[in-house]
Amino acid sequence: MKKRLLAVLSFALLITFAALLKAQDQQTTLVITMTNDPSSNKVIVVDAASHAVLQTLSTNGKGGVSGNARGVKEYDGQLLAAVNYGSGTVALFKRAGDRLVFRQLVAPSSPPVSVDFGNDHMYVAGTHTVDSFRLVGDYVGSLDGTALLALAGGGLPADGATAQIGVVDKHSLLVTIKADPIPGTVDVIQLSNGAIFGTANAVSAPGGTLTPFGFSVYPDGTALITLAHSGHDGLFRQSAFKVVVTSGGQGGNCWTTRVGKYVFIVNTGSRTISRAIGTGSNIFIDNAVAASVATGGSPTDTDAAGGYLSVIDHSSGSGATSHLSLFTYNAFGELSPSGTPLDLGVPNANGMALMVPAHDED
């Protein structure tokens, strides 16, 4: 009798587990941006496959950030952070099926610009500071570290100079700072048990270059950083630029996202996407024009995951609006347009994150 009961219970558990897996498989890849409205910011959630808008959800704050990357950032397919620059908070959301649910507001030490996750922490780069917050389950806990951002020539960055934050490894993270007409700065921030400690090590961009901006980090800790206003890309490793190359003739090489060995660079001036490969000691422009952004607007951020690469852009003039363009990619980094670009119906959408079901990530 006991054996029969155990067999029935085991079978029931298998059925339940299979049902859970099937439910996960039915989850879609979500494409998320924010309206960036300076009065009432919202996140826009789109189905990557159908391009249907699934949700427009308040961030309980004000937008208004510009000239940045990673204004929204997902973590582990379950959490999403969005910066409320105008109200000085970061909004946190939890994924529930194919929807987001608001969880909490977090207050960094200066108006937030860019967000990243790693080492069981959320990191926020603001106008003048960089902060670390410990993750506690599905929530963000208290501030456990902070440092002032610094320019290589001395002093604090001006408002609007902070570009992007990104985790390198368990020991450090980077913040890029624009400082035209001088070369600009990469701040190296040290970590201890995931928390920020000490002061920023401000590393100048190489002579003859301008504007460290977007970057992607390889698993070995090497970062490929765009030097946007001089048309260069730099390889940054062990707190130094190791090599600088030209960006393949594309204008405004600003935002990046990485898929395996490939780093895709969105060129806001040329309205193109380049494909590059970084090694520990060099950068190769594998394809200067891997795809074009066909909406006529200027691209402003990108992300890639789950077989999709997404880009947002802004048009200008009368009737200005933002568009979402989606591409698929294969194992060779070849991009193909996916459907028709979506008019988001807002003029200054900012931030881009692709949230795939946790078991489906690349």
Image (tube, rainbow, N blue to C red):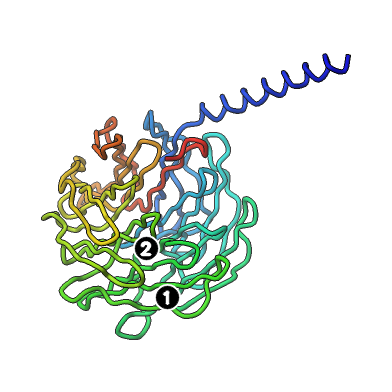
Q: Is residue 104 left or right of residue 273?
A: right
Q: Residues within 10 Å of mark 1 (few under 14, many from 20)?
A: many
Q: Residues within 10 Å of mark 2 (few under 14, many from 20)?
A: many
Along the polypeptide, which appears first: circle 1 or circle 2? 1
Residue 311 place in picture, x, y as percent: 30, 45
- Residue closest to the far bottom: 154
Instruction: Tell me the kind of residue under disc 1.
Output: His
Instruction: Tell me the kind of residue under disc 2.
Output: Gln
User: Which residue does the numbered mark 1 point to in the structure image?
Assistant: 128
Q: Is residue 337 left or right of residue 74?
A: left
Closer to us: mark 1 or mark 2? 2
* Residue depicted at 18% across the width and 44% down the height: 296
Residue 12 place in picture, x, y as percent: 73, 20
Residue 127 place in picture, x, y as percent: 41, 72
User: Which residue does the numbered mark 2 point to in the structure image?
Assistant: 164
Q: Is residue 51 above or below residue 274?
A: above
